[in-house]
Image: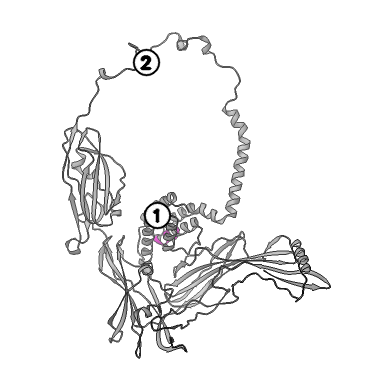
Amino acid sequence: MSATLHRQFGVTVAGCLILRSPSRNARGGEGWGTKSYRADRFAVGSVPHPIRAPAFRGHSNRMGHPSLRLSRARTHHWQLGVMMVAGVLAVGAVRPAMGVSVKAMVSSREVVPGEALELQVVIEGASQAGQPQLPSMPDFIVKMLRRAPNQRSSVQIIQGRVTRHSTLTYAYQLRARRTGRLTIPAITVKAEGKTYKTRPIPIVVAKGETSDALLVEFIASRKSVYVEQPFELTLRIWVRVFRQGKIKLSDRQMSRLFDRDCDFGRFAKQIAKKGFTAQETPRKDSEGQERKYYLYEVSQTIRPDKPGPYKPEPVTIGMTYPVALGRDPFGDLTLRRRRHLIQQAKAPDIVVQPIPEEGRPSTYNGAIGRYTWKVWPDRTDVRRGELITLNMEISGLGLLDRVPAPRLAKVPELTERFKVLDEQLAGEVKGGKKVYRQKIRAINDETDAIPPIPFSFFDPDADGGKGRFVTVKSDPIPITVYAAEALSPNQIVVPAAMGPGRSSLLTAAADSIRANYGEAEAVLANQAFAPGPGWAASLALPPGLWLVGWLIRRRSDRLRNDVALARRRGARKQVEARLQTAAGSPDAAVHLADALLNYIADRANLPAGGLTRPDAVGRLREDAVPDEDIEELDKLLQACEEARYAGMDTGGSDLVTQAKRCLQQLERTWKP
């Protein structure tokens, strides 16, 4: 807090009192400078990462302890007290700053493909503002940097007038997909009941500097696989060993020169947790000369879940490669000259084949892998018609959680002797095994065994990788079925209350309905006035209507003032409308992914348009959503991303059906 006190014409007045709250923006000022690189000094055993973040210029947000400064050197304490009281009594109503402004800024207008730039949407002077609505940006990969915006607020008191000023800053990371002149379209923001739009921002994406000093590539263990057939995908980063005289930088030192905003795609979490494996190995450069390289590797097992070309998430690696080293006055090594390199990994040529139709047995239900099959009942001695629980255990190599229930209704040897109940089976996965339980009933007492039950699956590794269908059968299980007991008419027990010889037949009475009553007074109706339910309803209707109207108005006021609640309430309706649009669109995967991510953003009150699949999955995990629901959503979003990058027909109706099932489950289990 600071105050400036003045004396004018012998009268002491409260001049200016300014209160500021500490800023949450760690970066500082509002201005954006040009991108710069700094060569930090480093010891031989350690190379610090060069700072490549955009430089921000402008006023500093650092706040010290509140202080009070006087314009004159001598002011008596009683005068100060009188002036402070006068200032407080003169304070009027709090007024917001005049005018609302919304603007978009970027850290750089010139980038190379894959290089990260930061987009900030700044909302100033609004007491109530919704989150920015990012439009579709197919030329960029958009990622939200922070879930909540940076907030900065100030209160200014001038001659009794209190003015509040607030600033909200939303930050996103953008990566260009191609070269050329691109445009970040206008961004819509709703604030103070009005709609604002930012100006479009032109971006120039030039071809970056490439060199064989940095190479990035994907290596796949197979060129052709079936759906759900596992293969190893390895990310390799080659960095040429740097030598200067007797100085040789180690693999650890060179890895520290990687950019902080490198995009490792699907390998990002694995690298953050376990890092790379590194080794020094020879490799020929572009001129055919053999040189020493540091090879950084990380691998994952991939099980594609849809046919077509496999396209992993893009990987972009940038680094500051040294050209010449020097020493500072303290004797530590520094980067005297350097150059910035950036490389994108080319997508591997992998074709995912669908499960063949030829040779598919009638009992095949979609299982892929190599499995063993075991069946046993819960009992072997039963009476005809009694339930038997048939336990079916599946184990082996494959995704057990995706193995569907066997189709017992298509096994004629079983349906001839047993009634198979038509029910939805839920399998239980535990200890590397999956168990289904099916209810059956013996049709007649001549049944002496449960016949062999087949289980069919497709083994993609059979016949040298050509794949074929395999059917395994369980062993027959002997059982004993007894005839069901039947009751004769003489075994039917008559209740004692009916008395001996009392007939259960109806007897017609000649004396009309009086035969049903012992006294004539019982026939007379009660003529006394008694208000019925209609009277009570008519009396309660006016206050009830008033209460309903009050609740409706209260709800509308709450939705108008609480943006987060309004988004959460309308999330389901909006996503259903978007799913209908996606079902009839040729770009179903694109619209479907946007619909699901916007749904999660609305329910969690996160910025819409910048939410990515890892962010959505991370938020659901924070809210303790069951893992199986998160995995189903993650697989669906991954399928949409792969279809988007592959540019092929995705079967919109099937994806929409999966999305609706996933949304129904999230509505039940997700409580943000």
Total number of numbered labels? 2
Q: Quadrant of residue 129?
A: bottom right
Is residue 598 a member of the stretch shown in magenta? no
How far across and how far down the image is residue 253, in percent?
38, 80
Residue 506 seen anywhere in this rendered image of the structure: yes
How far across and how far down the image is residue 183, in percent?
49, 72
In this view, the residue farthest toward the bottom is 245
> Could you tell me the amino acid type at mark 1?
Ala
Looking at the image, residue 81 lies above or below residue 502: below
Colour scheme of the picture: one colour
Tell me if 359 is positioned left or right of 188 in this view.
left
Residue drawn at x 25%, y 66% as measured from the top left:
224
Determine which of the numbered discs, if any, sits on residue 659 in the image: 1
Tell me if 424 is positioned left or right of 47 in this view.
left
| Residue under numbered circle 2 | 497
Residue interval drawn in magenta:
589-595
Is residue 593 a member of the stretch shown in magenta? yes
Element type where label 1 sits in the image: helix
Tell me if 275 is positioned left or right of 458 in this view.
right
Residue 361 seen anywhere in this rendered image of the structure: no
> Could you tell me the amino acid type at mark 2?
Ala
Element type where label 2 sits in the image: helix
Looking at the image, residue 564 lies above or below residue 203: above
How far across and how far down the image is residue 393, in percent?
24, 49
In front of the other: 18 or 222? 18
